[in-house]
Amino acid sequence: MKGYKFYEQVNAAFDEAAQYTTYDKGLLSQMKICNDVLHITFPVELDNGKIEVIEAWRVEHSHHKMPTKGGIRYSMTVNEDETMALSALMTYKCAVVDVPFGGAKGGIKIDKSKYSQRELEHITRRYAFELIKKNFIGPGTDVPAPDYGTGAQEMGWILDTFRQMSTDLNADGCVTGKPVEMGGIRGRTEATGRGVYFGIKEACDNKEDMKELGLTPGIEGKTFVIQGLGNVGYHAALYMIEAGAKLVGVAEIDGSIYSEAGIDLEKLMEYKAETGGVTGFEGTETLEKSNSVLESDCDILIPAALENQINEENAGKIKAKIIGEAANGPTTARGHEIIKKRGALIIPDNYLNAGGVTVSYFEWLKNIQHVRFGRMGKRFEENSYKKILSVIETISDRKFTEKELSFLAKGGGEAELVDSGLEETMINAYNEMNELRKKHDVDLRTAAFISAINKVGTIYERMGIFP
Ligand code: GLU
């Protein structure tokens, strides 16, 4: 039953946490189950005129809040179990960071590299058409977003397909992570990686917790290894480095590299674009097994690729004191137990990678409000600051330079407001979760699940059951 393990693992983590809550058993079962599972197959015509049958899914896990929300993944690993597990994780993730959506997830089982742009567009549009036909997409029903193997381009195609078939005033809100020109929001591309950074920073800034781990507080000076330099991994690494951490190891599909002296991220990205991989990058040692860098010396390990990467085979050899789960489900239940016994801190996926859906929420709000954040208030704020500064100038005899003025009297535009909303969200959720961890003497993953179960459970209790 290997194929059904991921969903089982998510439910095992749920059950572990449910012991610390007082909800009725039936209600807990309702919270765990996937409400709607859509499995579709459709034909596409390839560039060479041949027809291929494509398999895809969309799962809506929980309707306790509407719309449901979650990414669409393009990968050969996509199957029903994976999509169900990921949709459940979306419900819990949204609850942990107080994003008012139910969880969903979709996926198309394809190897993206095997198709032309035209073929990918056809596959995406046909998938969107199937979702529309079956009422599995819409600004008030179910709102997809990018995930592994998809980005703004695919979301743009989905929105355009939706628009062809709908006159809904809020149509732009049927999908998030779209190009800014089509109603997307500034900061969405960086959001998941940025959230990973905010979450790890918050953990590292906690003096008491760092002391328990035998680490000094703060992100500065800490070494880290990252698995996967896709959109999430790259941005997480970028912000970690900006804050003074040192990237010492990278694992990618072609293998892994290590350098105690540190790795230049931008140069590595250029090298990866040229060669298609990371091995052989100058100044680094290439390790034999593609994942062996996960076991090398570092303070923080960030798995930012796919699920089940830290498991019973390698968990015992991992030396990092902090595991920041940027990917969804990167640690198996056994892997988690082994790491926990060693006393390391696991910052769980259903909190740490919630930056993406948080900024998706801001994008959806922008779409249904039909106004860009900052449009009404930015100038007003700037003028108010300028007035205060001019009073300071008159009473202090100090003239501000143009440069000082533009720095001190800056109002919040869309990018700044999104970033501030994301930081606020990640900090609040971390501390809420950490308090539950201490209160119940559990790990952070269980604490995140307790937080999610309580938030979803209260809604179910208040809502009652429809006859
Ligand atoms: N795919 C991302 C995730 O797993 C984002 C989902 C969204 O923005 O709806 O959280």
Image (spheres, rainbow, N blue to C red):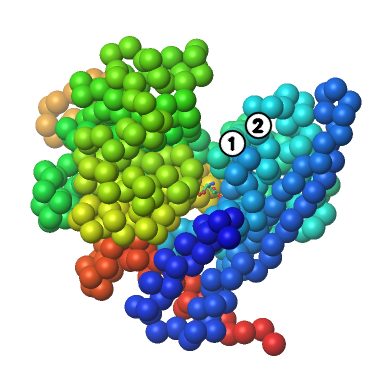
Q: Nearer the viewer, residue 200 or 178?
A: 200
In primary-sequence order, the first of circles 1 and 2 is: 2
The amino acid beneath tag 2 is: Lys
| Ligand 1 within 8 angstroms of badge 1 C-beta | no
Q: Nearer the viewer, residue 257 or 19?
A: 257
Circle 2: is it few (<14), some (14-19), or many (20+) Cα within 10 Å? Answer: some
Q: In the figure, 121 relative to 355: above or below?
A: above
**Point 72% across, 41% down: residue:** 158
What x and y, as percent, mark residue 276? 51, 19
Near-viewer residue (454 or 342): 342
Considering every residue shown, the one lying at the far right of the view is 49
The quadrant in which residue 265 appears is top left
Residue at position x 74%, y 46% from top? 55
Q: What residue sits 68% from the left and 44% below the top?
A: 108
Mark 2 secondary-structure assignment: helix
- The reply to whether dot 1 and dot 2 touch (C-beta < 8 Å) is yes
Residue to which mark 1 is pinned: 149
Instruction: Bin the neighbour count of mark 1 within 10 Å (Cα to Cα): few under 14, some 14-19, many 20 and up.
Output: some
> Where does the image place residue 112, in percent across and percent down from the top left?
65, 31
**Which quadrant of the view contains residue 319?**
top left
The Cα–Cα distance between marks 1 and 2, rounded to whole angstroms, is 7 Å
Q: Is residue 307 visible?
A: yes
Q: What's under tag 1, amino acid-wise?
A: Gly
Q: Describe residue 411's horizontal placement relative to residue 50 as left or right.
A: left
Secondary structure of the residue carrying tag 1 is loop
122 left or right, relative to 90: right
Seen at 68% across and 54% down, the residue is 58
Quadrant including the N terminus:
bottom right
Q: Which residue is mark 2?
A: 112
